[in-house]
């Protein structure tokens, strides 16, 4: 990963008195100024969503709003029945790879979608190895993983082929779940094929929904039925306020996740094996650490099968996503005896995409010699520069060394994740910052920030109303200065823009 340097990088050196200037700003005056900026937005074209954000901004410092966990729809089925085509049809855009070859779905599996003003997450499963011997087991396994992390299952069958032995294998699993299952009979391109869909009644999953993912036929009717039972907020990923804070332990196979959980618990709760990927299911444990109760989720991958190693990585990433949905903070374990890998960076990026707080735990520190330590520091600077704000703890999961340092790191990250900045203070920050370092001219125009507000916490999410598009480098500059002034150690920061035009008089 290359280090991103912006033309604004030296601005913070020049502007090293920003914190002092903000400390001198009277809170009451800051709120009055923010109110004046807010009223100035009436000259601009705003939509209903803008007005909702602005209404929230007037709630003051205590008006913390948590973004609800979006309901999750999982699409399962054997290879080549049209799952990815259905994903694209539901999303209304080409996201998933569609190819007339079984098993092409690989890395990216979760997509954000919207249908008739309802927002949701769509999980496209796949990723098995097209191996005749193991296909039944692997399709069933991916269905099982999908069921774990969703609110509604769409089971896709090729109506032109009918139910196969593999389909029957998955049906047995689906019958046991208490979650709503919709049987989607795909490739019903016209009325003449309706009878082929009707034949799927005998699977025992209720009424088949005949659709053509390719042409869109029947998809709206099927979605209408789905959205009648889909919850507004995910029951799987539901934010449970109060109670123990929830910690996901993440990391590549055999990095020491289960050892860490066992040491923290003070007993053998999870099977530890030298073979990578021995943990099968996420294990939720309430553990006392540092005088507090925490809920830990151990999320090692799926058992690796020789004939489907890449598939195992796919399932592990699904489980990682499921654990992150349920967690508030992620501890990413890195094995210091090994070079930092692409997989390590990918796991960290999953945490960033999920918006969860982050702590980096460098494991097997007791095995480190001076040479490896020098190389490690270079790797961290090169590959993990983008998460330099995450608290770092050097531990040994095997011996329990420095495990107690995890607690203050977790508390710091969660406190940052919960933080809300009052609208007056935030706009004072933006005013001082843009006066000192204005956005450069682009095409003869200079975009201005009209007003800013923190729209949500967990993670801290800021909305900027602007007169033009802000460079990505300038947005990163704002994020960096926010961290320098307000900390946010251990929490990602989201900065969204809303470019608005003046009303025509």
Image: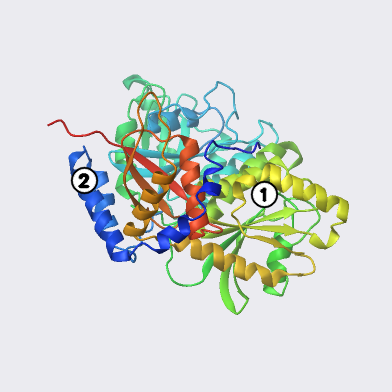
Residue 130 locus on image (x, y percent): 66, 30
**Residue matched to label 2:** 40
Q: In the rendered image of this protein, does residue 47 appear above or below residue 21?
A: above
Residue 28: name its quadrant: bottom left
Q: In the rendered image of this protein, does residue 6 appear above or below residue 232?
A: above
Q: Nearer the viewer, residue 176 or 284?
A: 284
Residue at the extreme left:
505
Labels in figure, total: 2
Residue 180 locus on image (x, y percent): 40, 49
Mark 2 touching mark 1, by CB under 8 A?
no
Quadrant position of the C terminus in the picture: top left
Residue at the image point whose x is 29% and y is 39% from the top: 224
Q: Which numbered disc, 2 or 1, marks the residue closer to the eye?
A: 2
Residue at the extreme bottom:
291
Q: In the rendered image of this protein, does residue 190 appear above or below residue 431?
A: above
Q: Earlier in the sequence, mark 2 or mark 1?
A: 2
Residue at the image point whose x is 42% and y is 48% from the top: 433
Quadrant position of the N terminus in the picture: top right
Q: Nearer the viewer, residue 110 or 337?
A: 337
Residue 214 locus on image (x, y percent): 41, 22
Structural crowding at the residue carrying mark 1, measured as other residues with C-alpha within 10 Å and reported as few (<14), some (14–19) or many (≥20): many
Q: In the rendered image of this protein, does residue 46 appear above or below residue 237?
A: above
Q: Nearer the viewer, residue 345 or 295?
A: 345
Residue 373 visible within the image: yes
Structural crowding at the residue carrying mark 2, measured as other residues with C-alpha within 10 Å and reported as few (<14), some (14–19) or many (≥20): few
Residue at the image point whose x is 36% and y is 59% from the top: 425
**Residue matched to label 1:** 302
Secondary structure under the numbered disc 2 in the rendered image: helix
Secondary structure under the numbered disc 1 in the rendered image: loop
Distance between mark 2 and mark 1 Cα atoms: 55 Å
Q: What number is the disc on residue 221?
A: none
Asked if residue 224 lies left or right of residue 407, the reply is left
């Amino acid at each position: 990963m290359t280090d991103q340097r912006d033309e604004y990088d030296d601005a913070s050196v020049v502007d090293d008195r920003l914190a002092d200037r903000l400390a001198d700003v009277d809170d009451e005056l800051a709120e009055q100024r923010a109110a004046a900026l807010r009223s100035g937005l009436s000259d601009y074209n705003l939509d209903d969503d803008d007005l909702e954000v602005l209404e929230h901004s007037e709630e003051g410092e205590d008006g913390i709003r948590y973004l609800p966990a979006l309901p999750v729809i999982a699409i399962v089925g054997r290879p080549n029945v049209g799952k990815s085509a259905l994903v694209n049809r539901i999303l209304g855009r080409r996201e998933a790879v569609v190819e007339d070859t079984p098993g092409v779905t690989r890395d990216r599996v979760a997509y954000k979608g919207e249908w008739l003003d309802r927002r949701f997450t769509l999980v496209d499963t796949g990723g098995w190895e097209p191996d005749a011997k193991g296909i039944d087991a692997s399709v069933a396994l991916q269905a099982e993983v999908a069921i774990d992390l969703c609110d509604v299952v769409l089971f896709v069958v090729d109506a032109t082929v009918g139910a196969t032995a593999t389909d029957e294998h998955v049906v047995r699993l689906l019958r046991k779940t208490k979650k709503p299952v919709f049987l989607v009979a795909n490739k019903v391109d016209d009325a003449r094929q309706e009878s082929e869909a009707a034949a799927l009644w005998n699977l025992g999953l209720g009424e088949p929904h005949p659709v053509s993912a390719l042409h869109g036929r029947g998809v709206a009717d099927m979605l209408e039925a789905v959205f009648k039972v889909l919850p507004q907020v995910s029951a799987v990923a539901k934010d449970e306020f109060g109670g123990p804070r929830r910690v996901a332990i993440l990391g590549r196979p055999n990095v020491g996740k289960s050892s860490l959980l066992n040491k923290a618990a003070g007993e053998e709760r999870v099977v530890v094996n030298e073979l990578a990927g021995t943990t099968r299911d996420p294990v939720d444990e309430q553990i006392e650490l540092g005088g507090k109760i925490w809920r830990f989720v151990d999320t090692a991958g799926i058992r690796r099968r020789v004939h489907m190693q890449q598939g195992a990585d796919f399932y592990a990433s699904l489980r990682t996503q499921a654990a992150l949905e349920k967690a508030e903070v992620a501890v990413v374990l890195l094995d210091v005896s090994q070079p930092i890998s692409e997989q390590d960076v990918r796991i960290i990026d999953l945490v960033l995409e999920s918006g969860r707080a982050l702590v980096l735990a460098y494991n097997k520190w007791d095995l480190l010699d001076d040479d490896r330590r020098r190389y490690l520091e270079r790797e961290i600077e090169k590959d993990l520069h983008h998460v330099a704000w995450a608290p770092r703890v050097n531990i040994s999961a095997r011996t329990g060394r420095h495990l107690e340092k995890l607690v203050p790191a977790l508390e710091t990250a969660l406190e940052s994740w919960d933080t809300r900045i009052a609208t007056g203070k935030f706009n004072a920050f933006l005013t001082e910052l843009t006066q000192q370092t204005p956005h450069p001219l682009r095409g003869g125009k200079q975009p201005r920030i009209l007003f800013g507000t923190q729209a949500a916490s967990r993670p801290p999410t800021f909305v900027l109303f602007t007169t033009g598009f802000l460079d990505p480098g300038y947005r990163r500059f704002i994020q960096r200065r926010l961290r320098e002034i307000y900390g946010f150690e251990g929490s990602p920061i989201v900065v969204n823009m809303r470019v608005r035009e003046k009303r025509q008089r």
